[in-house]
Image (cartoon, rainbow, N blue to C red):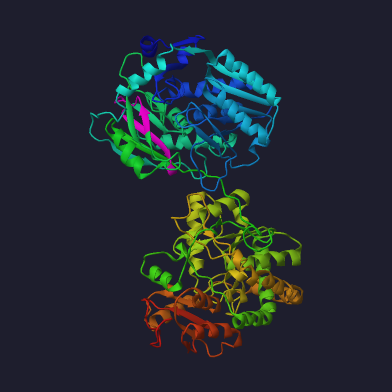
C-alpha cells in the first residue's frame, strides 16, 4: 500500500521488482514534488547492509555484460548514489570516482555539472590523478534512479568535450524515463557519435494527476518542517572510535581503486572489532560517505543480531507518521561540513528509538563542533550508546611548485612542496613581530619580516665573501654529497629545509651530476620550530619515493634546535603515516657538532646567509598560519617577483659550482679520512649556548643564536640585543659588523666562544628596551 498513491493518485507502475526497490514520498522542493525513496540504498530508509551491498554488486554484474571486455571507469553521483557506485565498481574491479559538493582546497575540478531537479544542484569532479579519465575505454555513470536522464547527459557532454570516447554506460536501480526521454538519449548518442548503453534492475513509469504538484506543495506548507524528535531515553554515552589506519581512503571523492577496496575491507574489520555494541545497531553514514559505513555494518552482521545502515541527507522530505508512507520520523540538525555548500539543515530519517546503538561514521573534515552539538546530541536522546567513528580525510596531494612560476631556480633544480602565498599580505615590521612573538600573541611562522634589501656597500661585502669562500663551500658540498651517496645511494632523494637548506640542496644535486653523472630528485619542504615538519609534504614524498632514500638537507647548524625538531617531527610523522623516514640531517657546516653528516664543522661564512630571498630563488621563509592555509595544503611561502633585479641566486650557485673541478681532488683525498673519523655529535655548541644564556641573564636558549649564519639572520630578521664575536673572527665577518653598526647593536669581543660569533635577542623585548650595553634597541 502507498499512502502517496492513495492520497494523490500518484502511480508507480512497471516491473514486478519496481515497488520492491522504491517507494514514493513527498519532498519540499519546487522543482519536483515527489521523491523516490529506495529501500535498498541505505540512505533514507535503514536497510540490511547485506541487501545494500548485494544489490550494488548485482547492478555491477549487469553493467559488466555491456562492457564486452572493455576497461571501465565508474562515476557515481553525489550524494545518494555514492555508495551504490562504489559497489558497482567493486563488482567490476574498476576504478571509481564520485562527484562531490564539497570544495577541497588546492584541487582543481576536472568537470562540473548541474542536476536540475536536485535540492542541491551543483556537482564537481575532483580526481587526484589527472589521467584517470584517459585510461579506460568505457565510462560508467551510476545513479539511484533515472527519471529523465538529463543529469547523465549533462555529465557525459561535459566530459566528452575534454576526453571523447566511443562507449558510455548508464546504470541505475530503476529506470523511469518516458518514451520522449529515451528518444532524447538516442539523439544525444548520435550527436556524440558514441554508444550509450542504459541498464537498470527495474524499469517502469511514474505518473500523477495535473493537480498533484500544487496539492503536494499545499500539504508540505501546512505540515511542520522536521525539527527533531522528542527523545524518551536518558542521554546516551558517546564513544569516539579512531582506529581507521592512516593512508586508507575513506571515499571515492578523489578516486578509489581495487587496492583501496581491499584496504577499506581490512580497515572496516578493525573498526567493527573495536565497537562494543548491543543487539540492535544502526550504522549511520553522513551525506556522501556511504560505502564505508555499509562495510562496517557488514562486518558487524556476523556478531550482532540486528544491524541496519542508513545515511544523513540534505534532502528536505515531508515527514508523515502514516501507514504506507516511507518517511515516518526525522532528526534535523545543522550542517557539520562547512566545505559542502555552506550552512543549512541536514536530516536523518527513520532513526526512531528502536536501536540500542548508533554508530555514526564521519570523516575528519566533518567532525566539527556543529556535529557534536547538533546530530550527536540528538542521537543521544534516541539510543543507549552513540559511537562516533572518525575517519581521516584523504585529500589529493598538491603538485610541487617549480620555477619560473615559483622561484627563480631552474625547474629541475628543486621542486617546492609549498603553497604559493605570493598574493597574501604577510609582512610586518620587525619590531611588531618581535613583540607579538615574545608576548605569545603570535608564532614567528604566522607572518613574515619585511625583506631586507642590501645597499651597494653591503652587496659588495656579499661579493667579496663569495669570492673568498666559493672554493671552501665547493669542498664542503663535495664532502657532504659523497657522504650522502655512500650512506644513502645510489640515488638519494634530497629534501632541503626551506629556505636556507635549498641552495645547499641545489649545489649537492649539481655535485652528484658533476662527480657521478647522476640526476637525483630534490625537493624543498617547510619545518617550523615548535610546530614540526610539514606532514603533507612527507605524505607526498612517501607517495612518490622510497622514504629510506630521503635525505634531509640544511645549510648549517647553530645550537641544533632544528636538528632536534626534525628528529621529533619525523618520528611522529612515521607513526602517523606508517613510513620510515630517517630523521638524520645532512648540513654543509656543523659548528655546533649536532649531526654526523656534514661538509665541515668549522664555523665559517656561507655567503647565502648574508642575504634573504635574493639568494634563495626569491622565495620567502616558510609560513604556517591556520587562518590562511586550509587542511590538505602544504605550508606556505611567497615568491618575491618584484625583487628580480636584485636576485643573485643563480650567481651564487654558478660561482660555487665553477670551483667543483678545482676541489674535486681534495674532496677525494679528504673524504675517506672523514668517513673513518668519529663523527658522533658532541652537542658542544648546545652547552655553549646554555652557558651564554645564563651568563647574560637571558634564561631562554631560543634567544641565543650561535654561529655566523644564525647571527646574520638575527641582524636581518629579528630585533638584536648584542653580538658576541671572537677576537680572531676575521674579515669574512665584516658583513656582521656592518649590519650591527647600521642597527645600533653593540659587538662584544668574547675570547672563549666555541662559535666565531653569536647573536643575542633581548628576552624581554618591548619598544624602547635597552641593549646589553644600555643603549636603546633600534
Left or right of 386 on screen, residue 474: right
- Which contiguous range is marked in magenta? 346-365
- Please tell me which residue lies in front, 115 or 107: 115
x and y, in percent, of residue 71 in the image: 67, 29
Give the image quarter of residue 93: top right
Give the answer, above or below, for where 665 lies relative to 217. below
x and y, in percent, of residue 17 in the image: 49, 12
x and y, in percent, of residue 709 in the image: 55, 76
* Residue 295 seen from this side: yes
x and y, in percent, of residue 237 in the image: 28, 38
Q: Is residue 206 magenta?
A: no
Give the answer, above or below, for where 367 lies relative to 160. below
- Please tell me which residue lies in front, 40 or 348: 348
- Counting labels gives 0
* Residue 554 seen from this side: no
Give the answer, above or below, for where 139 lies relative to 243. above
The residue sitting at 44% across, 32% down in the picture is 293
Pick the quarter of the image with the N terminus: top left
Left or right of 616 on screen, residue 385: left
Q: Is residue 364 magenta?
A: yes
Give the answer, above or below, for where 196 lies relative to 269. above
- Please tell me which residue lies in front, 777 or 266: 777
The residue sitting at 26% across, 32% down in the picture is 381
Give the image quarter of residue 608: bottom right
Left or right of 596 on screen, residue 472: right
Pick the quarter of the image with the C terminus: bottom left
Amino acid at each position: 500500500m502507498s499512502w502517496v498513491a492513495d492520497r494523490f493518485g500518484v502511480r508507480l507502475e512497471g516491473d514486478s521488482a519496481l515497488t520492491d526497490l522504491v517507494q514514493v514520498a513527498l519532498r519540499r522542493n519546487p522543482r519536483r514534488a515527489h521523491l523516490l525513496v529506495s529501500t535498498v540504498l541505505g540512505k533514507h530508509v535503514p536497510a540490511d547492509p547485506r541487501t545494500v551491498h548485494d544489490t550494488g554488486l548485482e547492478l555491477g554484474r549487469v553493467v559488466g555484460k555491456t562492457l564486452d571486455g572493455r576497461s571501465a571507469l565508474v562515476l557515481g553521483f553525489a550524494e545518494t548514489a555514492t555508495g551504490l557506485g562504489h559497489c558497482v565498481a567493486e563488482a567490476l574491479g574498476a576504478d571509481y570516482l564520485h562527484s562531490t559538493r564539497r570544495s577541497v582546497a588546492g584541487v582543481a575540478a576536472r568537470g562540473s555539472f548541474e542536476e536540475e531537479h536536485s535540492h542541491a544542484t551543483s556537482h564537481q569532479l575532483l580526481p587526484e590523478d589527472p589521467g584517470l579519465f584517459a585510461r579506460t575505454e568505457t565510462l560508467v555513470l551510476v545513479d539511484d534512479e533515472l527519471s529523465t536522464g538529463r543529469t547523465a547527459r549533462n555529465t557525459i557532454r561535459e566530459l566528452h568535450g575534454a576526453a571523447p570516447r566511443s562507449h558510455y554506460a548508464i546504470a541505475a536501480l530503476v529506470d523511469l524515463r518516458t518514451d520522449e526521454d529515451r528518444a532524447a538519449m538516442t539523439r544525444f548518442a548520435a550527436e556524440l557519435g558514441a554508444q550509450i548503453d542504459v541498464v537498470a534492475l527495474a524499469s517502469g513509469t511514474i505518473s500523477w494527476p495535473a493537480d498533484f504538484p500544487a496539492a503536494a506543495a499545499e500539504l508540505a506548507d501546512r505540515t511542520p518542517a522536521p525539527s527533531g524528535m522528542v527523545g524518551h531515553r536518558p542521554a546516551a554515552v558517546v564513544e569516539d572510535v579512531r582506529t581507521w589506519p592512516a593512508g586508507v581512503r575513506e571515499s571515492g571523492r578523489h578516486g578509489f581503486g581495487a587496492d583501496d577496496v581491499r584496504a577499506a575491507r581490512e580497515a572496516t574489520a578493525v573498526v567493527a572489532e573495536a565497537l562494543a555494541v548491543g543487539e540492535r545497531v544502526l550504522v549511520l553514514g553522513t551525506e556522501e560517505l556511504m560505502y564505508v559505513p555499509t562495510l562496517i555494518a557488514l562486518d558487524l552482521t556476523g556478531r550482532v543480531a540486528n544491524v541496519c545502515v542508513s545515511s544523513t541527507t540534505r534532502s528536505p522530505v515531508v515527514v508523515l507518521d502514516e501507514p504506507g508512507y516511507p518517511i515516518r520520523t526525522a532528526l534535523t540538525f545543522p550542517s557539520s561540513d562547512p566545505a559542502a555548500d555552506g550552512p543549512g539543515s541536514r536530516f536523518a530519517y527513520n532513526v526512531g528509538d528502536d536501536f540500542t546503538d548508533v554508530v555514526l561514521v564521519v570523516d575528519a573534515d566533518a567532525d566539527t563542533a556543529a556535529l557534536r552539538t547538533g546530530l550527536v546530541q540528538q542521537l543521544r536522546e534516541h539510543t543507549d550508546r552513540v559511537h562516533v567513528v572518525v575517519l581521516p580525510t584523504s585529500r589529493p596531494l598538491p603538485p610541487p611548485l617549480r620555477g619560473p612560476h615559483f622561484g627563480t631556480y631552474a625547474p629541475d633544480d628543486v621542486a617546492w612542496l609549498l603553497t604559493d602565498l605570493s598574493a597574501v599580505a604577510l609582512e610586518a615590521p620587525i619590531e611588531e613581530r618581535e613583540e607579538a612573538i615574545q608576548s605569545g600573541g603570535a608564532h614567528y611562522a604566522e607572518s613574515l619580516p619585511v625583506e631586507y634589501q642590501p645597499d651597494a656597500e653591503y652587496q659588495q661585502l656579499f661579493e667579496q665573501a663569495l669570492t673568498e669562500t666559493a672554493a671552501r663551500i665547493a669542498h664542503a658540498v663535495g664532502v657532504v654529497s659523497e657522504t650522502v651517496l655512500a650512506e644513502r645511494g645510489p640515488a638519494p632523494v634530497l629534501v632541503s629545509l626551506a629556505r636556507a637548506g635549498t641552495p645547499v640542496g641545489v649545489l649537492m644535486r649539481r655535485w652528484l651530476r658533476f662527480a657521478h653523472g647522476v640526476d637525483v630528485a630534490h625537493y624543498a619542504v617547510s619545518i617550523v620550530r615548535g610546530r614540526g615538519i610539514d606532514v603533507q609534504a612527507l605524505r607526498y614524498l612517501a607517495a612518490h619515493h622510497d622514504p629510506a632514500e630521503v635525505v634531509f638537507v640544511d645549510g648549517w647548524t647553530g645550537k641544533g634546535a632544528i636538528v632536534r625538531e626534525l628528529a621529533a617531527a619525523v618520528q611522529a610523522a612515521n607513526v602517523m603515516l606508517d613510513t620510515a623516514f630517517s630523521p638524520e640531517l645532512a648540513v654543509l657546516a656543523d659548528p655546533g657538532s649536532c649531526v654526523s653528516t656534514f661538509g665541515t664543522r668549522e664555523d665559517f661564512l656561507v655567503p647565502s646567509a648574508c642575504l634573504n630571498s635574493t639568494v634563495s630563488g626569491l622565495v620567502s621563509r616558510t609560513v604556517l598560519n591556520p587562518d590562511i592555509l586550509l587542511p590538505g595544503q602544504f605550508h606556505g611561502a611567497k615568491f618575491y617577483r618584484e625583487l628580480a633585479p636584485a636576485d643573485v641566486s643563480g650567481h651564487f650557485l654558478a660561482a660555487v659550482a665553477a670551483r667543483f673541478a678545482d676541489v674535486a681532488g681534495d674532496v677525494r683525498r679528504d673524504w675517506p679520512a672523514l668517513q673513518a673519523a668519529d663523527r658522533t655529535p658532541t652537542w658542544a655548541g648546545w652547552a655553549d649556548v646554555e652557558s651564554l644564556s645564563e651568563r647574560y641573564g637571558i634564561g631562554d636558549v631560543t634567544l641565543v643564536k650561535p654561529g655566523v649564519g644564525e647571527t646574520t639572520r638575527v641582524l636581518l630578521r629579528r630585533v638584536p640585543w648584542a653580538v658576541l664575536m671572537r677576537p680572531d673572527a676575521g674579515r669574512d665577518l665584516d658583513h656582521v659588523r656592518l649590519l650591527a653598526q647600521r642597527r645600533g647593536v653593540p659587538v662584544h669581543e668574547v675570547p672563549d666562544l666555541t662559535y666565531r660569533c653569536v647573536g643575542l635577542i633581548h628576552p624581554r623585548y618591548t619598544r624602547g628596551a635597552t641593549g646589553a650595553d644600555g643603549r636603546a634597541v633600534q
